[in-house]
Image: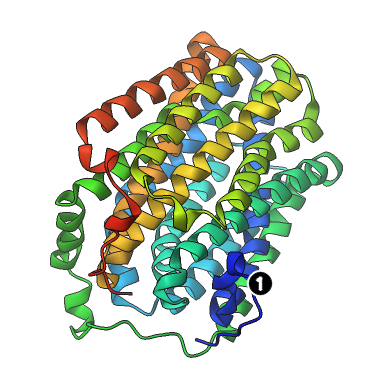
């Protein structure tokens, strides 16, 4: 991998040319994808009567989680058995086709929900294969000593996109409609495809000497599952991720808060959708120079998830736009601390040959949690209202965090000097 010496320490992973190409491409692509996520929820909310709005929004999560449960193990095996860069070329192309499909349905004036749900499910399936390959590729693009910095920079990149995408999405939705947001997202995937094609000298993964048929086997999938189940530390980070996002999925109900409680319209909705990313971005910038020096990483994760739950509770009580914005920003900030440290732990503790499978299994937790959480939030909101759904979800997050921390001393006591030197990258 090509490395220069021009970059400051806080950006040291960007010295690696291949990582830098992927980072820039994903920044632009994720901006489009997160614009589309906001547009899709807004689109669904416009197609149903007010009394069915909460349940219809919750169903978006259900359509996305079904492929995750079905494909998670398979996608991880694919990421470990095949060339990860080529897998990404396929998945990014397929994701662009899904966005074009949503744009086509919208511009034709369709009012049925099933095509939107169907395309959201296909997009979820594509994501199942994209994410393990993408995350497992990162350690091959940077030296091991720069991996923590690369993960933090990836978080910053995602949060930059999470601010730009929904904020721009609010403007696009208000001026040109949701179809335009879908079309812009379809075009944004070209940046990642170009970055992948321009990469050179990507490090080959050591130790892969089996045939393709053996690599894509039930035995290979079982090996990844056994690794996760026999590692209390990795298993605990996944459970914490799942319960935090399951109970505290505040963004699923944002169209209701924007339209019916705060009455701020599409522009205000775009800013509210971007608020968690604003907090995440600020926290990510703070973490860049310090993440490698955080020693009590296990306890830091637990306290971050507790903060996530408390901010969600206050969000549920708020009827003021700026207080709601602040709570959502705090939700994003606390989630960033937890996400970065969890990812560092998992990447450091997982051998390279198993990273794709570990990420595939983890998808059930960190993507399945928020998607099922959207359904849970929608069902509860349908019965007792959106504020009660958010408040009860925050309380559930606190209870789950306390239970996992109490049951897993390995997580509570985990320190950075325990990073395994035996997990090759």
Residue at 15% over, 60% down: 222
Residue count near mark 1 (Cα–Cα under 10 Å), binned few <14, some 14–19, many ≥20: some
**153 or 353, nearer to the observer:** 153
Residue topped by disc 1: 191
Q: Position of residue 294 (x, y in %)?
A: 44, 50
The quarter holding residue 280 reads top right
In the figure, 57 relative to 82: above or below? above
Q: Is residue 143 above or below residue 348?
A: below
> x, y percentage for residue 24?
65, 69
Residue 413 in the image: state x and y as whole percent. Answer: 27, 42
Lateral position of residue 266 relative to residue 315, left or right: right
Q: Secondary structure at mark 1?
A: helix
Residue found 39% across the figure and 62% down from its top: 132
- Give coordinates of residue 396: x percent, y percent: 39, 21
Please give the name of the residue rendered at 22% of the width and 36% of the height, measured from the top-left corner: 408
Q: Is residue 103 left or right of residue 310?
A: right
Residue 108 appears anywhere in the view = no
Q: Quadrant of the C terminus?
A: bottom left
| Residue at the farthest top position | 384
Q: Looking at the picture, tell me which residue is in the foreground, 292 or 165.
A: 292
* Residue 193 shown left or right of residue 1 in the figure: right
- 156 and 396: which one is in front? 156
Residue occupying image coordinates x 47% and y 90%:
201
Corner quadrant of residue 187: bottom right
Q: Residue furthest bottom?
A: 201
Determine whether 235 is above or below 252 in the image: below
Residue 59 visible in the picture: yes
How many badges with numbers are in the image? 1
């Amino acid at each position: 991998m090509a490395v220069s010496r021009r970059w400051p320490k806080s950006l040291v992973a960007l010295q690696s040319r291949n990582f830098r190409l992927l980072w820039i491409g994903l920044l632009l692509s994720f901006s489009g994808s997160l614009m589309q996520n906001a547009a899709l929820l807004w689109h669904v909310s416009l197609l149903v009567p007010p009394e069915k709005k909460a349940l219809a929004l919750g169903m978006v999560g259900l359509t996305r989680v079904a492929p995750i449960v079905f494909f998670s193990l398979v996608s991880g095996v694919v990421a470990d058995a095949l060339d990860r860069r080529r897998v990404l070329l396929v998945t990014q192309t397929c994701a662009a086709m899904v966005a074009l499909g949503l744009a086509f349905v919208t511009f034709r004036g369709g009012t049925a929900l099933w095509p939107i749900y169907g395309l959201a499910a296909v997009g979820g399936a594509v994501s199942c294969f994209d994410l393990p390959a993408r995350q497992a590729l990162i350690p091959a693009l940077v030296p091991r000593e720069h991996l923590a910095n690369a993960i933090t920079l990836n978080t910053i990149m995602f949060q930059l996109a999470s601010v730009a995408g929904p904020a721009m999405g609010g403007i696009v939705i208000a001026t040109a409609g949701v179809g335009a947001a879908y079309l812009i997202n379809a075009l944004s995937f070209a940046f990642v495809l170009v970055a992948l094609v321009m990469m050179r000298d990507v490090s080959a993964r050591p130790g892969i000497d089996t045939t393709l048929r053996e690599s894509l086997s039930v035995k290979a999938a079982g090996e990844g599952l056994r690794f996760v189940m026999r590692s209390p530390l990795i298993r605990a980070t996944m459970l914490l991720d799942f319960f935090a996002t399951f109970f505290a999925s505040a963004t699923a109900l944002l169209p209701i808060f924007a339209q019916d409680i705060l009455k701020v319209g599409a522009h205000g909705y775009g800013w509210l959708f971007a608020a968690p990313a604003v907090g995440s971005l600020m926290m990510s910038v703070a973490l860049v120079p310090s993440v490698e020096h955080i020693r009590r990483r296990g306890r830091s994760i637990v306290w971050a998830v507790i903060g996530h739950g408390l901010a969600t509770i206050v969000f549920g009580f708020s009827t003021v736009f700026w207080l709601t914005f602040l709570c959502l920003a705090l939700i994003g900030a606390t989630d960033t601390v937890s996400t970065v440290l969890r990812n560092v732990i998992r990447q450091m503790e997982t051998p390279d040959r198993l990273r794709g499978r570990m990420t595939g299994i983890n998808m059930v937790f960190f993507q399945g949690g928020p998607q099922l959480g959207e359904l849970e939030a929608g069902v509860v909101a349908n019965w007792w209202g959106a504020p009660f759904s958010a408040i009860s979800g925050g309380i559930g997050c606190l209870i789950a965090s306390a239970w996992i921390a109490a049951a897993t001393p390995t997580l509570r006591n985990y320190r950075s000097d325990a990073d395994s030197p035996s997990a090759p990258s």
